[in-house]
Amino acid sequence: MKIALIGATGYVGSKLVAEALARGHHVTAIVRNGSKLPPQRDALTLAQIDATDAAALAAVAAGHDLVISAFNPGVDANGNGTLAIIDGVKRAGVDRLLAVGGAGSLYLPSGQRVVDQPDFPAEWKQGALRTAAFLDQLRDEKKLDWVFLSPAAMLVPGERTGHYRAGKDQLLTDAEGESRISLQDYAVAMLDEAERPQHHRERFTVAY
């Protein structure tokens, strides 16, 4: 499979690249600065562009089977960057877009979103709200076959177990009430969805 991956050197994107390459896929790493990429391999192509330039993204993404966006909406103050990514993928003629989401837009048993809780960390709130806005933009999108994958509340480096639980719009917790997943297993879940699509025009979430 040919995968165009936006934000390939980021916190999540770098793990997605590693997982995709380990599975034998060809990855086009779309980044602003390619110096952080792992050593070049036959299955890894560098595309050093601004992914929020719709025309540039369309030119690079054309001919790929799907696009995975690990773009961080938290740095996208007006939401135009995420809209440009959606537009660029459509212009490229790629039907499938998988997006790295956040946990803030997930719902608690009370019916309220995680991001709207009084104890939600103030330093993360703006980024979480912008990421939730990206989900709303995708929900308005009628042409692309998009998926928004929200992680558990805690997404940290750890072990690749290959195991996770999947849900839809509710925050998943374990028997101890914790909501967590490793970056490595989040990448497993994303690539599982890329290889064997289970979701279409919807959000899902994964956790232990």
Image (tube, helix red, strand yellow):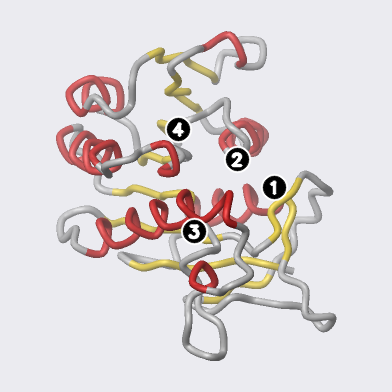
**Amino acid bearing label 1:** Leu
**Proximity of marks 1 and 2: CB atoms separated by less than 8 Å:** yes
**Proximity of marks 2 and 4: CB atoms separated by less than 8 Å:** no
Can residue 2 be seen at all in this image of the molecule? no
Can residue 45 be seen at all in this image of the molecule? yes
Q: In which quarter of the image is residue 103?
A: bottom right
Q: Which residue is drawn at 71% across and 77% down?
A: 173
- What percent of the width, then of the height, locates residue 177? 78, 80
Q: Is residue 34 above or below residue 169?
A: above
Residue at mark 1 to residue at mark 4: CA–CA distance: 16 Å
Q: What element carries label 2?
A: loop
- Read off the residue under disc 2: 12
Q: What element carries label 3?
A: strand
Q: Is residue 71 above or below residue 196?
A: above
Q: In which quarter of the image is residue 197?
A: bottom left
Q: Which residue is drawn at 25% across and 64% down?
A: 139
**Amino acid bearing label 2:** Val
- Read off the residue under disc 1: 183
**Amino acid bearing label 3:** Leu
Q: Is residue 144 above or below residue 65?
A: below
- The dot on residue 149 is 3
User: Which mark is in front, 2 or 4?
Assistant: 2
Q: Residue at x 62, y 36 (%)?
A: 11
Residue at mark 2 to residue at mark 3: CA–CA distance: 12 Å
Counting labels gives 4
Alpha-carbon neighbours of circle 1 within 10 Å: few (<14), some, or many (≥20)?
A: many
Which of the marked residues, 2 or 3, is nearer the chain's N terminus? 2
Which of the marked residues, 3 or 1, is nearer the chain's N terminus? 3
- What percent of the width, then of the height, locates residue 39? 66, 10
- What percent of the width, then of the height, locates residue 56? 23, 20
